Image (cartoon, grey):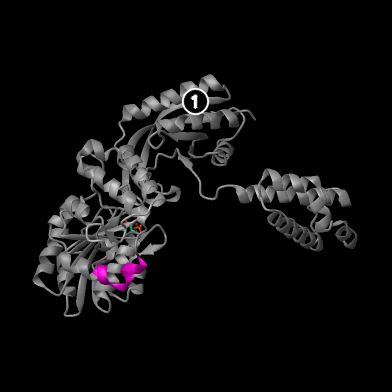
Amino acid sequence: MKELLRYIPPVHELQKDEQFEKLVKTLSIPEARVTKTIQTEIDLLRLQLIEGEEPVENPSKQAFFQYILDVTEQKLHIFQQERLFKVINATGTVLHTNLGRARLSDSAIKQMVDVASNYSNLEYNVETGKRGSRHDILEDLLIEITGAEAAMVVNNNAAAVYLVLRALAKDKEVIVSRGQLVEIGGSFRVSSIMEESDAKLVEVGTTNKTHLYDYQQAITETTGMILKVHTSNFKTIGFTESVDTKDLVAIKNKYPHVIFYEDLGSGSLFNFEQLGIGDEPLVKDVIQTGVDLVSFSGDKLLGGPQSGIIVGKKDYIQKLKKHQLARVLRVDKMSYAGLEKTLCSYIYGEEEAKTIPTVRDITKPLEMILKQANQFSRSLHQLTTEYKLDILEESSQIGGGTMPGVELPTYVVGVSHHQLSSQNLARKLRNNKPSIVTRVKDEKVLLDFRTISNEEIPELLEGFRFLGNV
Ligand SMILES: *Cc1c(COP(=O)(O)O)cnc(C)c1O
């Protein structure tokens, strides 16, 4: 081992090598950064040798020298690669939480770029020349769309829930149905967020059934709020019962000290149900029942940037805006810009709403999906004969913890390679540039064209052509 350690070259010798110079030049990396990486790799090699590992075959002074330069180059390449990058979502799941949820509309993106690259009136009233509030920027739009008295935007819907509980129900009892104590996406639990907010959880009913009288019996002088949580990501079926929003509003109206707040989760602004897709309530309809507050996500069914929207009675919204936490949970200007344009698309009718990719993809006509699938298959077949392609009937999901159990009929291209296993092909596709994320089923890689746009098809073809020649 001692012998081997002696083969490790000193940094200054490596620095004199022409590969070192080439690295600095071709990667445009400062010399100091390259030197630091070399030093790290030398230390790592030393450690490996001490632990009895043999990272270099046929060890010699020359072999170690080359090894250090090669791994340095690899590490620097990795360092220079993008960390957050574009992915082609061929899974058909429209709101894929791991793939960034909603894609934004062109108008939203344009506005975000404009606001990001310039100064803006984020907290400035151009009429008076005085300070303005970012909380007021989208309020009129949200009022128009939802019919609420007032509105504000925070960082995400989890933040909205926390703010509402902390600002309006701290040290008070909050009544929640046992069937609605949900966990969403692994990191958001209603019971935990309640604890964090110092509101006292009062569970009523059972897992499968909660009746109106359960709520009624639980109301005391110290009740601050009734919270209804949308069971976004699961469905209870069978012997179940939950209490309608309008009935809860009726109870609440008997107790002036009780606030009724509904966490809608996804909160739809588009009537998907009318098209036979799911039964997600419209925010507008929920507001109309007379609830005090409603919150929902900006990047689920709404199809905008990450944000949480709170709408409802003016007094309460006013309190929320003034709370210290509103500053902590506030939204960046780019999100406001993207959200504004996304919301605008809902104002001008169904066609305009379909310029929002989330709405467009969920409502994508089956014949359009089939057309894309056919076009892709034909083009790929012309490029290479390494694959066997079938067009299959399948179903896509909405995802993002919304509309559980809703299956949208779709067409997929089932791809098998004559040599690679489907798992292997899927792995290669993921590591392609751009990365292509697929489903694997019955020894086939499935491409669901619901979530693939026409602009992505050439990249998809190129990826398959490139990976096909093994
Ligand atoms: C998704 C969801 C949340 C969290 O919303 P984010 O915008 O992801 O923070 C909270 N409550 C419900 C019911 C949800 O479905």
User: In the depicted view, which residue is nearer to us: 344 or 284?
Assistant: 344
Q: Is residue 104 visible from the viewing direction of this image? A: no
In the figure, 442 relative to 310: above or below?
above
In the figure, 314 relative to 102: above or below?
below
Q: Is residue 222 left or right of residue 442?
A: left
**Residue 14 x, y percent position in the rendering:** 81, 53
Q: Residue furthest front?
A: 129
**Residue 26 x, y percent position in the rendering:** 68, 43
What is the secondary structure assignment of the residue under circle 1? strand
Q: Residue furthest right?
A: 3
**Residue 176 x, y percent position in the rendering:** 25, 68
User: In the depicted view, which residue is nearer to us: 113 or 295?
Assistant: 113
Return the residue at label 1.
389
Crowd rating for badge 1 (residues with CA inside 10 Å; few <14, some 14–19, many 20+): many
The residue segment tinted magenta is: 320-329
Whereabouts is ligand 1, in terms of quadrant? bottom left
